[in-house]
Amino acid sequence: MEGSIKELSQYRLSRAEEDLDTSRKLFDGGELRLSLNRSYYAIFHALRAVNALDGFDSSKHSGVIAHFNQYHVKTGDFPKNVSRMIAEAMEIRQRSDYEDFFIASKADAEKQLANAETVVSLTRQYLQNRFSDDEF
């Protein structure tokens, strides 16, 4: 049985929060490259939670990001600086996952974790407002 759009959005937000929690633990444990990865995926799943409300998803990360930027950043649902946070997270995640000999810095991992916390928090607030439901 398929769930509602709200349930899908809640599920995706819970994945974002789980990835955010994992990123924090990895950061605290000194696993900086892995923390960068989970920070990115926290952001990515938060975007997918919002995009679910539009009935949109994509198998490509660039498609998820482009839709979110066009329909939720450009329209003012989210502050413009979120677009920069997303781009930075994607770029550093790709470098850390695919470049040989990539060394993650503590400063980069800390910044991406903070950005992920911001995006997930803004997403939670946005969804609560959309559903007028404090228990979203």
Image (cartoon, rainbow, N blue to C red):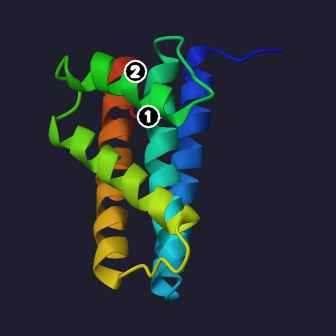
Find disc 1 in the rendering and name its residue: 47
Q: Quadrant of the N terminus?
A: top right
| Callout 2: SS | helix
Q: Give the class, few, some or many, for how many residues have Cα within 10 Å of label 1's Cα (few <14, many ≥20).
A: many
Residue lying at the far right of the rendered structure: 1
Q: In this view, does 9 lie above or below 116?
A: above
Question: Quarter-wise, where is residue 100 in the image?
Answer: bottom right
Name the residue at the bottom extreme: 30
Question: CA separation, marks 1 and 2?
Answer: 9 Å
Q: Is residue 25 visible?
A: no
Nearest the eye: 71 or 88: 88
The mark closer to the camera, 1 or 2, is 2
Please state which amino acid type lies under the numbered disc 2: His
Disc assigned to residue 102: none
Instruction: Please say whether residue 106 is visible from this viewpoint.
Output: yes
For badge 1, the amino acid type reads Leu
With respect to residue 15, does 95 lie above or below? below
Q: Residues within 10 Å of mark 2 (few under 14, many from 20)?
A: some
Measured from the top left, where is residue 131 in percent x and y? Answer: 40, 19
Is residue 91 rendered to the left or right of residue 73? right
Residue depicted at x 16% and y 42%: 81
Element assignment for label 1 = helix
Q: Residue at x 49, y 56 (%)?
A: 94
Which residue in the protein does label 2 denote?
A: 67
Pointer 1 with pointer 2, Cβ within 8 A = no
User: Where, by quadrant of the figure, is residue 77 drawn?
Assistant: top left
| Residue farthest front in this picture | 100
Mark 1 and mark 2 lie on one chain; the one further toward the N terminus is 1
Instruction: Please state the horizontal and vertical placement of residue 71, each as a whole percent of the image.
Output: 31, 16
